[in-house]
Amino acid sequence: MPGESADPAAAGATPLDSLEVIASQDVLVTPQLRHVELYTMRGLLTLLWHEPDGPAAPAALVLCGGAMGGLLGPAGGLYHRLGVEWAARGVPVLRVSYRRPNDLDACCLDVAAAVQLAVGGAGAERVVVMGHSFGGAVAVRVGVGLRDVVAGVVTFTTQSAGCEVAGGLAGRPLLLFHGERDEILPFHASEMVRMIAGSGELIALPGDGHLLERSGDVIHEELERWLPPVLGLDGSPRP
């Protein structure tokens, strides 16, 4: 909805306050996977929350989809894979299904609220936000708006529209993946976002398209390298 903001300072309230949740419910789908529904007057926000089986690390991942929404992410269900694997390592993972897909302000507020839940509900001190396509702009904007807790941002075949604020990441870790044969968004879109940010690592995926269906293993390996230091899980100080 126009006028919604993911920046608590701009809104004068937390993201959850701004959502104006009128009711919520959740169920355990499995012992480590919780389905959460938050009802608002502007739509239903749904989260799949992968919970550690044991003490949680002071870190979390928040993952969002593209302009059509969705919970699986690119690369053959990458988000589910990350949820299962990182929760097993003690890191909560929240997958976000937007209230109003393709509404940038509303989607940013949804993801900001998920970050707030990761901090307040799971004790995270460092959060990495990831977004695919349209969701790349959401991830960047939430990273800028919640700079005190978002330690890094990952984008997959991101659009550049909406990322004009990327300079506000102020040197925090930014990892971008883009297929060189993307049939929807050109590779140049990710190049543009990195240029605006002034830093970041862009990984080209030869022969792959917008859904990155051929690159799941490569992406997984790169995230295994990149995520632990950004989340502060390898003894390194927070970037």
Image (spheres, rainbow, N blue to C red):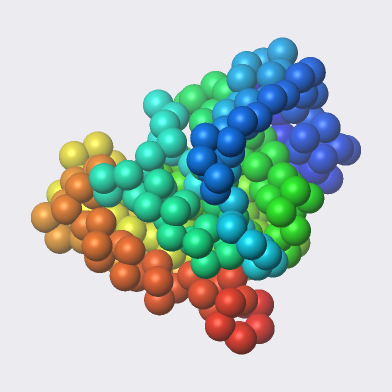
Residue reaching furthest bottom?
Answer: 235
The residue depicted at 65 percent of the width and 77 percent of the height is 238
Q: Is residue 29 left or right of residue 41?
A: left
Name the image quarter holding residue 6: top right
Total numbered badges shown on the rendered structure = 0
Along the line of sight, which residue is nearer the eye, 189 or 100? 100
Is residue 105 visible to us here?
Answer: no
Q: Residue 8 at what x, y percent from top left?
A: 80, 43
Residue reaching furthest left?
Answer: 207
Along the line of sight, which residue is nearer the eye, 45 or 150? 45
Q: Residue 70 at what x, y percent from top left?
A: 42, 31
Q: Residue 62 at what x, y percent from top left?
A: 56, 49
Above or below, 91 relative to 187:
below
Above or below, 172 relative to 154:
below
Is residue 143 visible to us here?
Answer: yes
* Image quadrant containing the C terminus: bottom right
Q: Is residue 69 left or right of residue 10?
A: left
Residue reaching furthest front?
Answer: 31
The residue depicted at 27 percent of the width and 49 percent of the height is 75
The residue depicted at 21 percent of the width and 57 percent of the height is 215
Q: Residue 37 at what x, y percent from top left?
A: 63, 26
* Image quadrant containing the N terminus: top right
